[in-house]
Amino acid sequence: MFITFEGIEGCGKTTQLHRLAAALQSAGRRLVKTREPGGSPMGSQIRRILLAEGYALSPHAELLLYAAERAEHVDKIIKPALARGEWVLCDRYGDATRAYQAFGRGLPRESVEAVHAMATGGLEPDLTFYLRVPVEMALSRARRRNEGDPKGEGRFEAEALAFHERVACGYESLAAEFSQRVETVDATGTEEKVAARIHSALERRLEPEFPL
């Protein structure tokens, strides 16, 4: 199974990915936890450029850097893990590119899709958890998280509220467009409550074919 976690900055997807991974491992599943950008050695180098505060990138350059990182990630990390029969849990993937670069930056959707398809060879997740949180709440979380962060990965958090609202609208549109793959999860409330919603949704999606 290839499962991705998506949502706006501060939605809690990284925390919930680790929680689900722990539950699956406890149930005997072999898995790989990864992220975008930064899931491969080369991707870690690209991540520093993409997320560095104060680093101005053109929308097209941003899109192509994400695509280069994803191509390496898919070839070196994701596909080999799936071929070994392992589950892959990934923090962001193609829906992030659609939401941020097409809806957020305003790049043509067809161009974003073409670049994504080239980078992935058509590989899409089996299941995507979209964690839905009010924009201002999530952004406040994200900005608090980045205060004093020595990595300085706050370039997107520094964007105007209007940008994040466009991204959130993009995710809502994608959840409707890809409803067979995307599971929308209310990500408000405690970490435990959100984790329980995700686990319940996963069981509902997989049973009886892949019982947990």
Image: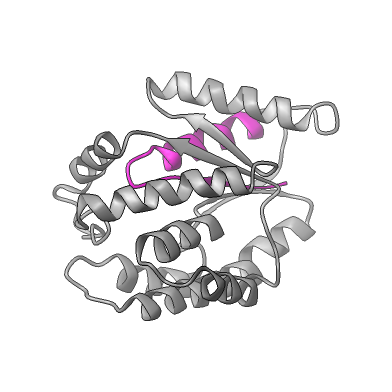
The residue sitting at 49% across, 53% down in the picture is 92
Q: Quadrant of residue 180?
A: top right
Query: Whole-percent x and y of residue 61?
Result: 38, 81
Q: Is residue 9 left or right of residue 132?
A: left
Nearest the viewer among 95 and 32 is 95
Residue 3, above or below 50: above
In this figure, which colouring scheme has been used for the structure?
Answer: one colour
The residue sitting at 65% across, 33% down in the picture is 24
Is residue 72 visible to us here? Answer: no
Residue 23, above or below 104: above
| Magenta span includes 83 | no
Residue 32, above or below 209: below
State the extent of the magenta-drawn residues as a range.
1-25
Query: Whole-percent x and y of residue 60?
Result: 39, 79
Q: Residue furthest right?
A: 209
Nearest the viewer among 187 and 28 is 187
Q: Quadrant of residue 37?
A: bottom left
Nearest the viewer among 163 and 183 is 163
The residue sitting at 56% across, 72% down in the picture is 110
Query: Whole-percent x and y of residue 33?
Result: 56, 49
Q: Residue furthest left?
A: 148
Quadrant that contains the C terminus: top right
The residue sitting at 41% across, 66% down in the picture is 101
Is residue 130 visible to us here? Answer: yes
Number of numbered discs overlaid on the protein picture: 0
Q: Quadrant of residue 50?
A: bottom left
Query: Whole-percent x and y of residue 190?
Result: 38, 20
